Image: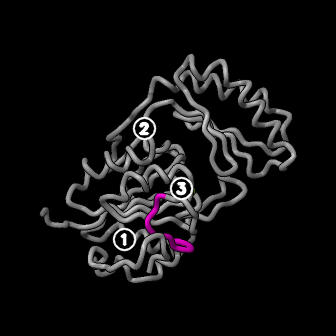
Amino acid sequence: MERIRGIILFLDFDGTLSPIVDDPMGAAIPDKIYTWLKKLSRKRGIKIGIVTGRSMQDIRKRVGLKNIIYAANHGMEVYYKGRFILRKGRTYRRPLALIAHRLIKELSAIPDIYIENKGLSIAVHLRRVKGNYHIRVQSIIRATTRPLLKKYGLQLTGGKMLMEVRPALHWNKGKAVLWIWRRIAPGYVPFYIGDDATDEDAFSALRPCGITVRIGRKIGSHAEYYIPSLRTLAESCLFDSGAVTQIRFRSENRRFE
Ligand SMILES: [Mg+2]
């Protein structure tokens, strides 16, 4: 058996590192978590990867730490040690820009809507939009994108208060974490923490070979464990001694202690 060299800790951003806020541009890592993350990022035997649906520019600016692997746009782009090590789907940028332009026009009458062109995907944020507009927004998005999705090889996906137009590539957070793990940290035990639908792909991918933890319990989740919030973990000494690989876990789909 291969010797375990350390841990590669993958973290989602929104709802995991940062609390969910109404304005996605206002999301930030709380001080205590930031200090914990910074300390971990300097530890030997620990590698950190942040895996998010945000754009690369956004996530790098928002976290601002070096020595971290950044996987943006649901893992389509990976940046590490000063350069991109993966850039998928560049040919989608033009059609996505066209669709973003159309969506901005079609949705201009909806109060508090926020349409974000992330380069490799478009996000329509509904968190601040009043509930009675949601169905209308969804049907406008469907009608606007329908003729273009197939033509350009794109897909429409939905998340928590968010609809996204993304390349219909068979690529997701799960494929991305496996790619990063094999390429950057073979011999390291993967540890994944996330809270949302897109993290389920990563839970499924890593569950057979690593530790998967969901923020908040959810029946049917592919994560093996759950914790109430990342703070629980940051306040524990779990990663301090490097002893995480020896931890005995309690039973399945239970609280992680
Ligand atoms: Mg999340």
Magenta-span inclusion, residue 229: yes
Identify whether 122 is placed above or below 190. above
Question: Between 49 and 147, which is closer to the camera in this rendering?
Answer: 147
Magenta stretch: give its range: 222-230
Checking the image for residue 40, the label placed there is: 1
Query: Which image quarter holds the C terminus?
Result: bottom left
Residue 164: where, in percent of width, then height?
Answer: 62, 38
Checking the image for residue 62, the label placed there is: 3
Q: CA distance from mark 2 to mark 3?
A: 24 Å
Lateral position of residue 127 relative to residue 211, left or right = right
Query: Which image quarter holds the N terminus?
Result: bottom left
Quadrant position of residue 37: bottom left
Mark 1 is on which residue type? Leu
Question: Marks 1 and 2: CB-CB under 8 Å?
Answer: no
Mark 3 is on which residue type? Arg
Residue receiving disc 2: 171
Q: Residues within 10 Å of mark 1 (few under 14, many from 20)?
A: some
Q: CA distance from mark 1 to mark 2?
A: 28 Å
In this rendering, which labeled residue sits more in front, label 1 or label 2? 2
Magenta-span inclusion, residue 106: no
For the question of whether residue 119 can be seen, the reply is no
Residue 218: where, in percent of width, then height?
Answer: 58, 64
Query: Dot 3 lies on which element?
Result: helix
Instruction: Please state the quadrant of the image where ligand 1 appears.
Output: bottom right
Query: Dot 2 lies on which element?
Result: loop
Residue 245: where, in percent of width, then height?
Answer: 27, 73
Residue at x 55% of width, y 72% of height: 229
Q: Residues within 10 Å of mark 2 (few under 14, many from 20)?
A: some
Q: Residues within 10 Å of mark 3 (few under 14, many from 20)?
A: some
Identify whether 41 is placed above or below 205. below
Mark 2 is on which residue type? Trp
Which of disc 2 and disc 1 is earlier in sequence? 1
